[in-house]
Amino acid sequence: MKEIKNQLLIQKIESYFFKKNLPLIQTGDTVKLNIKIQEGEKMRLQAYEGIVISKKNNNLNKTITVRRTMQGIGVERSFLIHSPKIETIEIQRSSKVKRSKLYYLRNLGGKATRLKQIFK
């Protein structure tokens, strides 16, 4: 009984931090994230665009891993979806994939990393 009360209390506290206007992000989507970055006393937005190669769902700790290539080098970053540092998330394009984790893209380069696009 005590555990149930604790879980309800945790859910109530977490519900305050959930973002309401998130798009449905799938693995294989090309997304554009606007991230708040603080430089000294100034805040600015920086865009980060790449392919979602994995999703992890755990209530408030929902994360996505986004991969992009910069100057021929693959860069991956994990983002907390409900983080206050993420201003907006836009889905640029959706792709048809048969796997939930696209880790095989790490070993590919150039045109081999293209995914088949889905038009909605």
Image: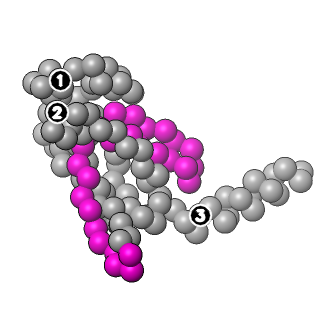
The residue where tag 1 is placed is 109
Tell which residue pokes out farthest to the left in this image: 111
Q: Earlier in the sequence, mark 2 or mark 3?
A: 3
The magenta segment: 40-67
Q: Relative to residue 56, is residue 11 drawn left or right?
A: right
Q: Is residue 80 visible?
A: yes
Q: Whole-percent x and y of residue 38? A: 38, 70
What is the three-letter code of the residue carrying label 2? Gly
Q: Relative to residue 17, is residue 80 drawn left or right?
A: left
Q: Earlier in the sequence, mark 1 or mark 2?
A: 2
Label 2 residue SS: loop
Q: Quadrant of residue 15?
A: bottom right
- Marks 1/2: CA distance? 8 Å
Q: Whole-percent x and y of residue 9? A: 75, 62
Q: Whole-percent x and y of residue 7? A: 75, 53
What is the three-letter code of the residue carrying label 1? Gly
Badge 2: how crowded within 10 Å, few (<14), some, or many (20+)? few
Q: Quadrant of residue 116?
A: top left
Q: Quadrant of residue 13?
A: bottom right
What is the three-letter code of the residue carrying label 3? Ser
Q: Earlier in the sequence, mark 1 or mark 3?
A: 3
Q: Nearer the viewer, residue 6 or 34?
A: 34
Q: Whole-percent x and y of residue 73? A: 22, 33
Q: Is residue 98 visible?
A: no
The residue where tag 3 is placed is 15
Badge 1: how crowded within 10 Å, few (<14), some, or many (20+)? few
Determine whether 111 is above or below 50 in the image: above
Mark 1 touches mark 2? (CB < 8 Å): yes
Q: Nearer the viewer, residue 119 or 102?
A: 102
The residue where tag 2 is placed is 72
- Residue drawn at (44%, 53%), measured in percent from left and top? 81
Badge 3: how crowded within 10 Å, few (<14), some, or many (20+)? few
